Amino acid sequence: MENDIALKADHIVKYFYQPEPFKVLKDLSFEVKKGEFVSLIGKSGSGKSTLLYVLSTMDTDYQGELVVNGEKLTGQSLNQLAAFRNKHIGFVFQFHYLLPEFHVLDNVMLPAMKLKKLSRAEIEAKAYDTLKLLGLADQALKQASKLSGGQQQRVAIARALINDPAVIMGDEPTGNLDSKNAEIVFDIFRQLSHERGQTIITVTHDDDFAGKSDRIIELSDGSILPAAN
Amino acid sequence: MLSINYKIAWVHLTSSLKQSIVALLGVTFGICMYVFLTSFVQGSGSVQTALAFTSMAHIHIYNDGPADNTNLVRKFYGANVLSLIRNAKVIQYVQGIKNTADIISLVRQQPEVVALASEVNIDIFFRNSANKINGTLSGVDVENENKVFGIADYMVTGKWDDLKYDPTGVIIGSGLARKLSLHIGDNINILTPDNISKTYKVIGVFQTNVTTTDNTKAYININSARQLLSENQQYLTDLQVNIRDYDATTPVVGRLAPVIPYKVERWQVANQQLAAGAILRDVMSTAVSLTILMVAGFGIYNIMSMTINQKIREIAILKAMGFSGGDVTTIFLTQAMVIGLIGGIIGLGLGFCLAEAINHIPFKVAGQKTLPMTYLPKDYVMAFIFGLVTTLIAGYLPARRASKIDPVTIIRG
């Protein structure tokens, strides 16, 4: 049973101290199964992004316990967490955040080059494969800044996939895209989740997007609303 | 496989090439000026020291005369007794240095000693009929005197070695020759404090460019000087000692002073303004050079900070992808290092060229032909080290700031 759990949040509590103490996340507990495609929704200020960044291990200022891929992350040092993110978590943000001076291929290879598990040639082959999966193989040697917004976001997804992470986290990955490109990105996510068993957690405003995912976790004022489906 | 950190650093450096070059020029200029200034200041310093050492040895041993011993009352009754003694007369029991053979062999045993010259110095009047000039007649051990002071190099006419075999010959300073209208072959009359008068023949003229020396000094053979004073073959008034490193007089003096019953004086004490001048010059040039390097450092700091501000989102995303704070520091410190290394090497080259060019500018003062310059590897190494340290500090501060960037605040905006 334990093996099916990709991510487990246990009594997560978080405060904001500026401008005055404020409880953003109120004792949240939930689990995400492997291969599940979860959407975090809620109004602005409901704490959904804050929760995502706690889950992403980048925000360490919380109470409670976080377990990803069977490893307890609460209490680990920043460097340990960085190494963990490198290996087990892929990110797709609202903005693509590619390194503009690098080729598309180099951008995709970046997390793997940091991980150093494979040789350069293997990483390159894998990056090509991933780009092919996302229909970008012909763009591999272009400068990242020369691509369109939708293409850049797909490169960012390829970058998130390169180390075969346990979880991909998205912060409004379609927020900056037109509906056609948003559709493409959503299809890619669903394909990854269903065909490759990739666990995905994304924050989104887009109700269409959320409605098509496996499960919705809706936050309101720092608490999880009872599941509708 | 080149580490990904270095690759990112390299891309940052080459993608904003203009900025990198400006930072690099800062370091280049700083190190160039550091090299040039230290070479120039040390060059002029060594010229001045060389000039000074034409009339001064590293260590001088002489009879300083008795201490003030006139208040005998205090000696016996202590300081509490008032005494009034007027016109006390001092009797100097010992003139010059006695037991010279023992002292000379003791000095020669010191491993640092490279040259030692005995002198019999007499204050006298030089006379050429009506013209009278007071000055010093120096009876010298011809060969060793040259070893200590290199006086043969300063001969204008005549040969220094001629003094060795000519008991009536005298070599006089150029100023003295001019004032007394003397030329080679002319006679010069001298008068000692004991009213002994003797005539010598001018066999040479020297010019050290130290005006007081050139105007007042003359050399004769040491044996002639002893004869003039009716002293024995061991008599001498001054021992001039040169050691290997003129800055390291202290240990030698420390060993000699307690066992030699005469004044043993380092040149730094005898000529404090020279020693002080040398130190001040060093301090000044170092201060100016370090200031220039610091300005270059600020330039690097500025440009690195700008780069980091431009790349702050990239840094955040790198950290999100699992790059640690140390990786980020490495990326930016590598950029600073590359700027420091390349700028430093170019700066050393330019500094050498500048020094070489300035070294060719004519400068005809005090026996110089061109502006003085030294080329010490030590200075180049120091300049390079200082340059690297400056760039490292200037690069480390913004790099550390970058490493502490919290990705959440940047990405969430």
Image (cartoon, grey):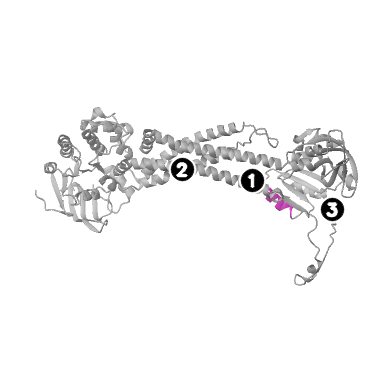
- Estimate how packed mark 3 is, as few (under 14), some (14 to 19) or many (20 or more) residues with alpha carbons within 10 Å: few
Q: Mark 2, chain letter?
A: B
Q: Mark 3, chain letter?
A: B
Where is residue A24 drawn, in percent x and y? 21, 55
What type is the residue that disc 2 sits on?
Gly
Identify the mark nearer the N-term, 3 or 1: 3
Where is residue B13 drawn, in percent x and y? 39, 35
Q: Nearer the viewer, residue A190 or A23?
A: A23
Where is residue B75 drawn, in percent x and y? 79, 67
Compared with B327, B94 (above or below) is below
The question of residue B254 being in magenta is answered with yes
Q: Mark 1, chain letter?
A: B
Tell me the magenta residue range: B247-257
Compared with B319, B83 (above or below) is below
Q: In the rendered structure, find residue B263 and report the number of the disc placed on it.
A: none
The residue wearing badge 1 is B278
Residue drawn at 70 percent across, 35 percent down: B367
